[in-house]
Image (spheres, rainbow, N blue to C red):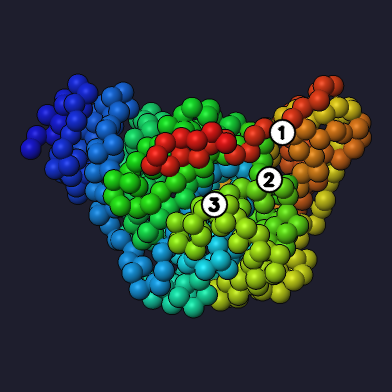
Amino acid sequence: MQTVELIHKKRDGKELTTEEIRHLVQGYASGTIPDYQMSAWAMAVFFQGMTSRERAALTMEMVHSGEVVNLDSIQGIKVDKHSTGGVGDTTTLVLGPLVAAAGVPVAKLSGRGLGHTGGTIDKLESFEGFSTSLTTDAFVKQVNELGVAVMGQTADLTPADKQLYGLRDVTATVDSIPLIASSIMSKKIAAGANGIVLDVKTGKGAFMKDEEHAVELAQAMVEIGSHVGRKTVAIISDMEQPLGLAIGNALEAKEAIDTLKGEGPADLTEICLTLGAHMVVIGGKAKTAEEARHLLEEKIADGSALAKFREFIEAQGGNGGAIDDPSQLAQAHHLIEVKAPAAGTVAALEAEEIGICAMMLGAGRETKDAVIDHAVGIVLAKKVGDRVEEGEVLAVLHANDQSKVAEVKERFLKAVTLSDKPSSPPRLIRALVTEQGVTTL
């Protein structure tokens, strides 16, 4: 099989067979296909796209390029959740114990963050002693006993995807929906879940800036899941402004605790109940999303979701006492108020810029080797649609190093738009994408 012929075939918009896609993925992973040929093929895909079958074939070839986690010994239907990323996205910390409390096993492989704020593991490590360094046997045992566990991703998971992503990053082919979809789904499928719930963010703080492309990506991933026998649904949700009020690792951990108590921000609570309801339906514990949502609300109200969170944290070596007393989480030395320069209604809070502000304080990583400060970040006092008077607090900066505070305050204020006209918050949940199609919500 000649690689150049496959490049030519895709360049001309023709469909590749599964065997031809296998040749490309295996050849690139083994080093027999050089970067320049794989770059040419990726660019051809960028312009010509891929069929649903091609996307599924590419996904599964990347899955089988490395380790595939076998979760068959975990009782029940295992459901994973993936978010395409955002600012203040604390959903995994809430959903893990909440869905487990409803009887659906949550066996999650997660990573660290790079960019605006920390990843799921960084947030969980805000609980002193918490570790994701589990063996697969210990991981499976914990899910069977507690219903939830989080383990760090291994380097052996989808190595071909890592190679291809690194190539796309330097060849202007990152923004290709077939390649994005297969990259995300390969990791989810290799992680062993039976079903997958996707939270595809759209807006200025999201990878997919406009709703049309977010829906297109969601449809591509749902189709891949369907092709390979994984029940998959996707929610399109807003990321014009940060989710919740807290941006920063320990701050978000506290917000997760509040949400599991039924005292969290309305938008974070809503997105968790929406995503969680679909996880519970796929997991077979409810027939409809409405029934599942009611079940989840009961688990928050009776305290069992919070109790499950404590069990989960303590099972992985973390300080469960911080759930009863969040002051035991890392605390910043300096709290600095950012006040409104004028009266008005908050018309915009640019999520990406506010995430960068949190990163400048030390809550995120600018490079893979950077050390994050779990204590620092930003807590918003106002969201879009809220009225604010001149001199009223817009947000509180939690800082240890004060050297960048002045710059962060200035940048934060530029990310806030005040208007003399009433403003409404953006629609949080935009659409539901399933095998049957797209439903606007």
Quarter of image, res 57: top left
Q: Which residue is mark 3?
A: 289
- Seen at 17% across and 42% down, the residue is 18
The reply to whether dot 3 and dot 1 touch (C-beta < 8 Å) is no
Measuring 28% from the left and 50% from the top, which residue is drawn there? 228
Q: Residue at x 66, y 59 (%)?
A: 297
Q: Which mark is residue 267?
A: 2
For marks 1 and 2, give the CA distance. Answer: 10 Å
Q: Secondary structure at mark 2?
A: helix
Q: Earlier in the sequence, mark 3 or mark 1?
A: 3
Name above or below for residue 357 compared with residue 364. Answer: above
In the image as oriented, which residue stretches furthest toward the left?
1
Q: Is residue 282 left or right of residue 173?
A: right
Give the Cα distance between marks 2 and 3.
18 Å
Is any part of residue 304 visible from this angle? yes
SS of the residue at dot 1? Answer: loop
Percent position (x, y) of residue 64?
Answer: 25, 54
What is the x, y in percent for residue 175?
A: 41, 31
- The amino acid pointed to by label 2 is Asp
